[in-house]
Image (spheres, coloured by chain):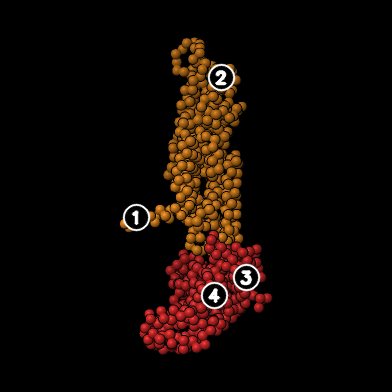
Amino acid sequence: MRIMAILRKELRQLSRDRLTGGMIVGMPLLQLILFGYAINTDVRDLRTGVVDMSGTQLSRQVTADLAVSQVMDLVMQAETPEQLTAALRRGEISLGVFLPRDFDRRVIQRDRPAGQILVDGTDPTITSVANQLRQFPIRFDSQARPGGSAGPAASFEVRTYFNPERRSAVNVVPGLLGTILTMTMVMFTAVAIVREKERGNMELLITTPISRGELMVGKILPYILIGLVQVALILAVARWVFQVPFVGSLLDIYLAAMLFILANLTLGLMISTFVGTQFQAMQLAFFVFLPSILLSGFMFPFDGMPRLAQWIAEILPLTHFLRLVRGVMLRGAELSELGPDLLALAVFAAVTLTLAILRFSKRLD
Amino acid sequence: MTATAVIQARGLTRQFGQLTAVDRLDLDVPPGQIYGFLGPNGSGKSTTIRMLCGLLTPTRGDAQVLGFDVIREPEQVKRRIGYMTQRFSLYGDLNPVENLQFMAEVQALPGSERRRRVDQLLERFHLADLRTQRAGTMSGGQRQRLALAAATLHQPSLLFLDEPTSAVDPKSRRDFWEFLFQLTETGTTILVSTHYMDEAERCHRLAIIERGVKVADGPPADLAAGIPYAVVEVMTGQGADARSLLQSRREIASVTQLGLRFRVLVDRSVTQPVELVRQVLAGEGVSGEVSLSAASLEDVFVAVTQKEQAGS
């Protein structure tokens, strides 16, 4: 039976390819367990800042109630509303709670919203949660009802920052920029070294005086340029087709993108030093790609994920780039305010490039 | 001779797991000559060349190439040699000019010299008409000339050529060897591996490698004169009978058929080898012409590998 002959040959070849064999078992198990735990569509533990201008017993009570709610994680006590919006712009908090000086009176009289919830509108899931907070129960209400008026319960006013019209394109397109770059850039360099090995070019190349560093850096540089061309294309479509606003400086966006491109290229290069064939390189590239999409905050909010998933996400370049591009492009933050994420990308690129150079050998054994 | 040897190896050994690809190889290659590595596929020729180029680390033994230790100073070796890999290793999607320009830059030729040198090589290796043709679409012979041009770009004094003519027609092979002799005239030493006898015959000096072991070493003529057999040629129409008769004799080491002819290796201890063969054949009624012949390199190869097999 000729079909059986092919079948046996395929299985035999698969069993000789150790990396692929490992991927067959390891990939689904690892990814399933990781994402099964990490992905949680309930939004919780959103980093929140509070400004309490009234400082009464009631306002302190409400602040305490907010703090123990699952949705919020109180990380900041600000003095002024300006501090709150600044923290929001830098991406330090996703929500801000503002309790005005006459908070008690507003709760009792219920003529105006008792306080404000400020929302970072760059992440759509956060926006939808904030809307539910509009009716956050203020305990004072249920205990005593002075005046006995039967109007609506005291409520919060929700103000969405950075995307007031709540258009999903505004949220999604900057994230897509990072996702698309991850997909293309890692692949470019992941196959760069193995391709020359497979085609036989490498044996000649490593018999020349070229140094490992020269070879590796030379492999990266052209793709930085290609990456920047892609960025320009995506930004043009974002601007003219999807009408995504560019609040921050365009130069900052390009600088962040360049660092991100570099980090992806060096990651690909490192992958290339671990694999024997282009096929294996592509498998490993996908192995990186999936967690990038699912854990970086592109699909699900970062804050709600368990610690372990957050740690993994902190390693991934896309996580940091998402913070950078949403910060600069939508919230108008300056790069100097986003130092940690820039640093993370730079360190990632430096480490993976060094590993790639160290792992690459100018020998055949 | 060892004082001026361009390549000097002592006890060079390389194992891949259980397999010993190269086994205690001693080698002295004098300057300015073509030194041949003759042996069948898998005999360890490529592995030896790769060790001498600083690409593979020997399991045991050591080697000096152009005065540098291949284990401790591989980069010094790489800087000074030219290497033509067995498989075409330039870029198939680039044309000859682009390929040579690239290699010139990698070899760090001064910018002013690059273009001149590339033009010179294209002319010299008859590639000037193919300037814009991609290497992937060129013929085997053209690709091989391009690879040789690339290997000689930086004018190395030592060239390693690993089966350079294995994918090339006879005419191109002849032309290729003309290029090699031209290179030796300017003082270049060439180590070339081959499994073609006619090519081996053209080397100044030859090492025959069999299953990782060097079984003979010397100028081709000396090797032919030195075998411990007399070569007797038999012309007969009764091939199958003649073969089995001759092979049954202990004094006869091997019988090789070439069409109607047989080349028979008779042990030197036999004083009248032609008579012996005649008697063996006549005794069983096989008729044929029997005459003494000079040993060819093919006979040498059969003789030394025969001895190796008998010994193992």
Residue at horizontal 45 percent and vertical 86 percent from the top: B277
Viewer-nearest residue: B133 or B153: B153
Tell me the CA gap for discs 3 and 1.
51 Å
Secondary element type, mark 2: helix
Does residue A286 lie above or below B228 as drawn?
Answer: above
Tell me the CA gap for discs 3 and 2.
87 Å
Q: What residue is shown with label 3?
A: B9
Secondary element type, mark 4: strand
Amino acid bearing label 1: Met
Mark earlier in primary sequence (2, 1): 1
Which chain is home to disc 4?
Answer: B
Instruction: List x then y, in percent, for residue B249.
Output: 46, 80
Which chain is home to disc 3?
Answer: B
Residue at horizontal 59 percent and vertical 23 percent from the top: A53
In the picture as drawn, the residue positioned furthest to the left comes out as A1
Tell me the CA gap for discs 2 and 1.
74 Å
Q: Which chain is red?
A: B
Tell me the CA gap for discs 4 and 1.
45 Å
Amino acid bearing label 3: Ala
Same chain for labels 3 and 1? Say yes or no.
no
Q: Which mark is residue B208?
A: 4
Q: Quadrant of the N terminus of chain A?
A: bottom left
Residue at horizontal 48 percent and vertical 36 percent from the top: A37
Same chain for labels 3 and 2? Say yes or no.
no
Q: Which mark is residue A61?
A: 2
Q: Which chain is orange?
A: A
Q: Which mark is residue A4?
A: 1
Secondary element type, mark 3: strand
